[in-house]
Image (cartoon, rainbow, N blue to C red):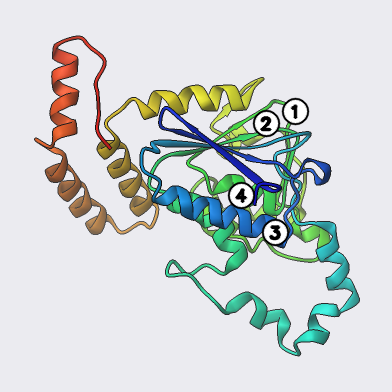
Amino acid sequence: MNDRVQVEIKDGVADVRLVRVDKMNALDDAMFGALIETGERLKGEAGVRAVVLSGEGRAFCAGLDMGNFGQMASGERRQRDANAGEALLTRDRTEGGSNRAQHAVMVWHEIPVPVIAAVHGVAFGGGFQLALGADMRFVTPDVRLAVLEIKWGLIPDMAGMVLMRTLVRDDVARELTYTGRIFDGAEALAMGLATRVCADPRAEALALAAEIAAKNPDAIRAGKRLLNLAAEGDQHAVLLAESREQGALIGSPNQVEAIMANMQKRTPAFAD
């Protein structure tokens, strides 16, 4: 896994870096596996309160490895399995409904603490969808982003349709999907696909992650659960969940510590 993804955990922040620099962190089977393994590990990692996801080298993630397109064009995948076009993508689903490629993105959405994607260089196709799996996206002004699948005669199929709909208007998602056009950080911010445009996204993401890690971890996790639920659009379920989450927080040790630290003008000492 270390030749695809590396992780350093310090002071509650997991610094996750894609390190396939010779291929601009392109997505091959090993990268899918490393992303899933890392995300699943961080779901239950004690002491992790925030995550920063970035790419080493020239890019965040260039998208699907070119070798995969060669296999598609040659018909190799269909020769192995007469129904491969559908069967290879629809079987082996997670509890959340994802196949392997989708889970490489959705696992970051499912991590119980905030995830910030620091994006530079390019994030095309699957790389762009990977960034969508984060809670927030910090990008450089000159970053190049695209829902690029149409260039290869495909559609976004790594959870992009689920995640993009919560960030942009329907017609904007359609335009990007139908054209595959490339856009920069300023336009991404204007459309709602970027949270912040900055010269050094990773540094700013790590700083914000450290700030989040200093908050009540129980409240942060409750907030992420509620925001994920709210995206599904069931008003009654969200209202009830708000009440339940707040009821569990009020008077809990970390909530009491937040109150006392503020009253005593000191740094809180939260327990995971």
Residue type for callout 2: Gly
Residue type for callout 1: Asp
Earlier in the chain: of badge 3 and badge 2, it is: 3
Could you tell me how far apart the alpha carbons at marks 1 and 2 are, in whole angstroms? Answer: 6 Å
Specify the quadrant of the image occupied by residue 99: bottom right
Question: Which is closer to the viewer, label 3 or label 2?
Answer: 3
Q: Is the residue under label 2 in contact with that under label 3 (CB below 8 Å)? A: no
Could you tell me how far apart the alpha carbons at marks 2 and 4 are, in whole angstroms? Answer: 16 Å
How far across and down, in percent of the image, does residue 69 sit? 84, 65
With respect to residue 129, does 267 lie above or below? above
Q: How many marks?
A: 4
Could you tell me how far apart the alpha carbons at marks 3 and 2 are, in whole angstroms? Answer: 29 Å
How far across and down, in percent of the image, does residue 167 sit? 51, 45
Residue type for callout 3: Ala
The residue beneath circle 4 is: 130
Q: Residue at x 28, y 38 (%)?
A: 272
The residue beneath circle 3 is: 30
Viewer-nearest residue: 73 or 28? 28
Structural crowding at the residue carrying mark 4, measured as other residues with C-alpha within 10 Å and reported as few (<14), some (14–19) or many (≥20): many
Disc marking residue 185: 2
Q: Is the residue under label 1 in contact with that under label 3 (CB below 8 Å)? A: no
Disc marking residue 142: 1
Residue 165 in sight in this render? no
Q: Residue at x 59, y 53 (%)?
A: 35
Earlier in the chain: of badge 2 and badge 4, it is: 4
Question: Which is closer to the viewer, label 3 or label 1?
Answer: 3
